[in-house]
């Protein structure tokens, strides 16, 4: 999808460290971590933000993936964060859920 950085990462146009992948989403380490572990869980479908979601099953599947990723990474205590809209701090306009763990 056009100039979207996460679509480019998914399409391997930009290298990144995939730590998890399934049919629906993939996960990478944040390039500028704000916690000891800072993972981004990103749907493969280009959805700009929470405001553009049409099928809320996507959210369920992303949280199922988060559960698997946390088991894989041995993360037990964590925060999740979704920034929606520029004023709320969203920088990349392709929906993603942050996992933050110290
Ligand atoms: P937002 O502010 O949109 O919720 O979060 C975007 C996140 O993407 C930021 O934490 C930023 O550090 C991360 N990010 C931006 N560009 C890249 C990139 O090219 N690779 C990776 N791994 N993370 C990125
Ligand atoms: Zn995208």
Image: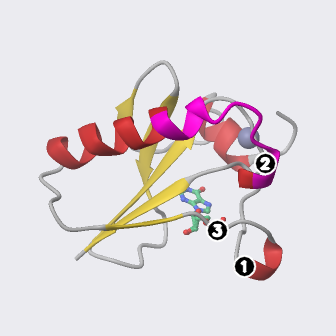
Q: Residues within 10 Å of mark 2 (few under 14, many from 20)?
A: some
Magenta residue check for 44: no
The location of residue 96, given as percent across then percent down, is: 58, 52
Q: Which of marks 1 and 3 is nearer the N terminus?
A: 3
| Span highlighted in magenta in the image | 51-60
Residues marked 1 and 3 touching at CB (< 8 Å): yes
Q: In which quarter of the image is the N terminus?
A: top right
How far apart are labels 1 and 3 at the CA level? Answer: 6 Å
Q: Which of marks 3 and 2 is nearer the N terminus?
A: 2
* Residue position marked by numbered label 3 in the rendering: 83
Q: Is residue 82 above or below residue 25?
A: below
* Label disc, if present, on residue 48 of the rendered structure: 2
State the residue at coordinates (52%, 25%).
Answer: 24
Q: Is 86 left or right of 82, judged from the image as shown?
A: right
Q: Which residue lies furthest to the top in this view?
A: 23
Res 18 seen here: no
* Label disc, if present, on residue 88 of the rendered structure: 1
How far apart are labels 2 and 1 at the CA level? Answer: 14 Å
How far apart are labels 3 and 2 at the CA level? Answer: 11 Å
Q: Which of marks 2 and 1 is nearer the N terminus?
A: 2
Q: Say which of 25 and 51 sits in front.
A: 51
Q: Is 80 left or right of 54, judged from the image as shown?
A: left
SS of the residue under disc 1:
helix
Q: In the image, ligand 1 is in what quadrant? A: bottom right
């Amino acid at each position: 999808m056009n100039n979207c950085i996460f679509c480019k990462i998914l399409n391997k146009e930009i290298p990144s460290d995939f730590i998890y992948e399934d049919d629906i989403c993939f996960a990478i380490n944040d390039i500028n971590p704000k916690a000891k572990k800072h993972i981004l869980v990103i749907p493969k479908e280009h959805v700009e933000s929470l405001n553009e979601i049409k099928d809320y099953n996507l959210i369920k599947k992303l949280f199922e993936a988060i559960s698997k990723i946390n088991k894989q990474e041995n993360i037990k205590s964590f925060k999740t964060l979704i920034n929606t809209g520029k004023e709320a701090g969203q920088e990349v306009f392709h929906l993603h859920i942050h996992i933050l763990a110290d």
